[in-house]
Image (spheres, rainbow, N blue to C red):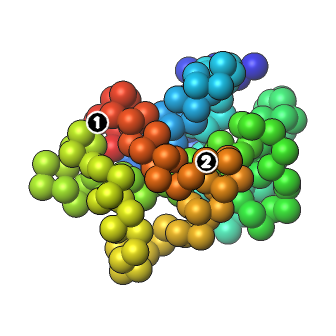
Amino acid sequence: MIKKEDALALLEEFTESESLRNHARAVACCVRAYAEKAGENAEEWEATALLHDFDYEKYPEEHPRKGAEILRERGYDEALIETILSHADFTGVPRTTPLMKTLYACDELAGFITAVTLVRPSKSIVDVKVKSVKKKLKDKGFARAVNREEIAKGAEELGVELDEHIGFCIDALKNCDEEWL
């Protein structure tokens, strides 16, 4: 099992961008909350989420395959590697476990919620509501890089209504260290 401290160290080794580190932390907050809700190993789920994009900054064209290669070289568990690979549709790795589905469902949404937070006058997650996230989702010019289809597909694969998923992730982020956003 990977520990949170080890995941953070690896994230920091490969990722200089504070915004990308913050993205990993935001996704990890949401994934951890889902693990706790489901009675799963929250630390393992959180650590996995912290690593989902660790290779992106250095190897954007090879992400996440390069990350999988690095993790294999360092002796990480194949289940962790497959989970990370499954968060990108183009790898063809099917999402067959609750953790795989949760990571996929939280990745784009956590980034989008963060973007919504940062345009609020207060820049505080406390002021973000489901309604405001849904409104921004309709605005194709806002956070253009975020794949809205993946957000909807993630909620569907997770088996939750989109509004419920958005609300759950907002609440999870409210319970995390706000300086990560």
Residue type, numbered disc 2: Val
What is the distance, in whole Å, between disc 1 and disc 2 at their CAs? 28 Å
Q: Nearer the viewer, residue 43 or 172?
A: 172
User: Could you tell me if the residues under marks 1 and 2 are in contact, i.e. CB atoms within 8 Å?
Assistant: no
Q: Residue at x 80, y 30 (%)?
A: 76
Quarter occupied by residue 124: top left
Kindly tell me whether residue 41 is visible in this rendering: yes
Question: For this view, does 97 lie left or right of residue 136?
Answer: right
Q: Is residue 150 above or below residue 48?
A: below
Residue 132 location, x and y as percent? 29, 59
Which residue appears at 53% of the width and 69% of the height? Answer: 148
Element at badge 1? Answer: helix
Residue 30 position in % (x across, y down): 51, 37
Q: Is residue 171 above or below residue 157?
A: above
Q: Is residue 29 above or below residue 61?
A: above
Residue 151: quarter of image: bottom right
Q: What residue appears at the point 66 percent right and 56 percent down from the top-left corner?
A: 156
Residue 2: where, in percent of width, then height?
A: 70, 22
The answer to whether 152 appears left or right of 123 in the picture is right
Classed neighbour count for the residue bearing mark 1: other residues with Cα under 10 Å, few (<14), some (14–19), many (≥20): few
Extreme-bottom residue of the structure = 141
Which residue does the numbered mark 1 point to in the structure image?
Answer: 179
Task: Check disc 1 and give the amino acid type.
Answer: Glu
Residue at x 87%, y 35% (from the top left corner)? 78
Secondary structure at numbered mark 2 = loop
Residue 6 seen in the current view: no
In the shown orientation, is residue 69 left or right of residue 140? Answer: right
Mark 2 sits on what residue? 160
